[in-house]
Amino acid sequence: MDVTSPRKINWEMIFALAALDAGIIISWTAYHNFQPKLLVHFHFEHLEEFVLIAQSVVMLTIPLLAGWLTDYYRRHNGSGFSVFAIGISVASMIFMAVAFTISDQAFLNLIWLLPALIIFWLISMNVFHSPANSILEAFTKSPELPLMMAVLTVTKVIIHGLKPVLLSTLEKAGGAFTFVTGGVILIVTGIWFARSTRNLSMEHHHGDGLLAGLCNSLILHFFPEILQLKFGEKETIFHDHLYISLVLGIAAVAAFPLSKLVRVTGMYKSLIIGLLIGFVAMLCIVTSNIFFLSVAASLVLALAYSLVLITAFPYALYNISARNATFGTGLFFASFEFFEVLFGLILHH
């Protein structure tokens, strides 16, 4: 038997992973929206900097630790999904605990636990992300991997593009309902993912996250304001997010056609092209005073961003050793989040 033959794709598993990733993004959006308000409301303002530093440390270290533990259990027990199960269970339970703590007078005497719950939630959310996404390493030889990544890319950019609508909905729902809903979303998507991967064999046959992370963080953190200043303010529910939402929408639409291009061009070459064109497009947008050139550069940036999201993680997977597959996945996510953490600290100060 040819052990290097491409693995048949279970598309239910890919859609389940996309749903799980969507649940994670929604949960992070809820966290970033309500965490500062909860700290102020319950008079923990003095812990704001501590929570920010703890968040930064967790985002950079826990994916590595979770990846190492998953690989360790996989080598000794044949499965590393116990780490995933523990992480998602704890995250969903903490969501519920926070909801009850902030919603009922009977729990006000436990409000002192809120900072600790926030830290434990941060840890648990970062525990299961790497083990879940490491399943894609089993498909590195599949010619359909770019298409699989396109599905995940569309999910990611659509949710980021609809962030103002999501935030408006969360504000109307209130903190308690939001945290209960977040817990339910994680439980449902976690169960679906676990069921869809129960028969998956993880016997594998065989510093790129930094630049991709820089591209991602610049677009999501700085370009909403840059594009608004460039094209003018519009009164919509999207506020200053309108133009970046349009860019993300184009990136989503382009993901599937670009996945075909990646299949022909190759993963590494496509990634380099995407990064190079993306940074050049950003430079053009920032420096150009010509309206139509800025519009064209924004369209090009959307295509380049989509290309980077499709190729960055798969290219990292090609360079991960079989023995440390999930640790390598954690290393990619930690490096991908590096600039997210750095910009968060810079913007805070």
Image: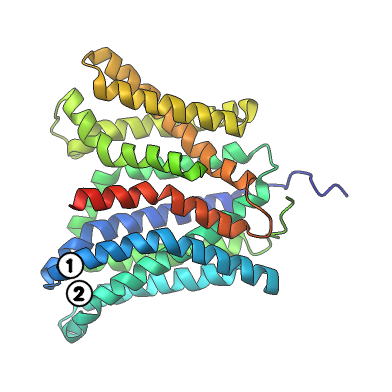
Looking at the rendered structure, the kind of residue marked 2 is Ile
> Residue 287 placed where, x, y %?
25, 21
Residue, x 32% and y 24% (percent of image)?
283
**Residue 321 shown left or right of residue 19 in the figure:** right
Residue, x 21% and y 48% (percent of image)?
347
- Label of residue 131 in the image: none
Of circles 1 and 2, the one toward us is 1
Let me know if residue 303 appears in the view: no
For the view shown, which residue lies furthest in the right direction? 1
Residue 163 is drawn in which quadrant? top left
Looking at the rendered structure, the kind of residue marked 1 is Leu
**Residue 286 shown left or right of residue 277 in the figure:** left
- Kindly check if marks 1 and 2 are in contact, taking CB atoms under 8 A apart as contact: yes
- Label of residue 38 in the image: 1
| Vertical side of 291 occupied by 101: above or below | below
> Residue 54 placed where, x, y %?
31, 66
Residue 56 is drawn in which quadrant? bottom left
| Vertical side of 96 occupied by 264: above or below | above
Q: Dot 2, how many residues are within 10 Å of its Cα: few (below 14), some (14-19), or many (20+)?
A: many
> Residue 194 placed where, x, y %?
57, 64
From the image, tell me which residue sits under label 2. 102
Q: Nearer the viewer, residue 195 or 26?
A: 26
Residue, x 45% and y 73% (percent of image)?
89
Task: Measure the C-alpha gap from mark 1 to mark 2.
Answer: 8 Å
Q: Nearer the viewer, residue 253 or 241?
A: 241
Q: Secondary structure at mark 2?
A: helix
Residue, x 29% and y 14% (percent of image)?
293
> Residue 45 placed where, x, y %?
13, 68
Q: Nearer the viewer, residue 164 or 216?
A: 216
Residue 249 is drawn in which quadrant? top left
Q: Which is nearer the N-term, disc 1 or disc 2? A: 1
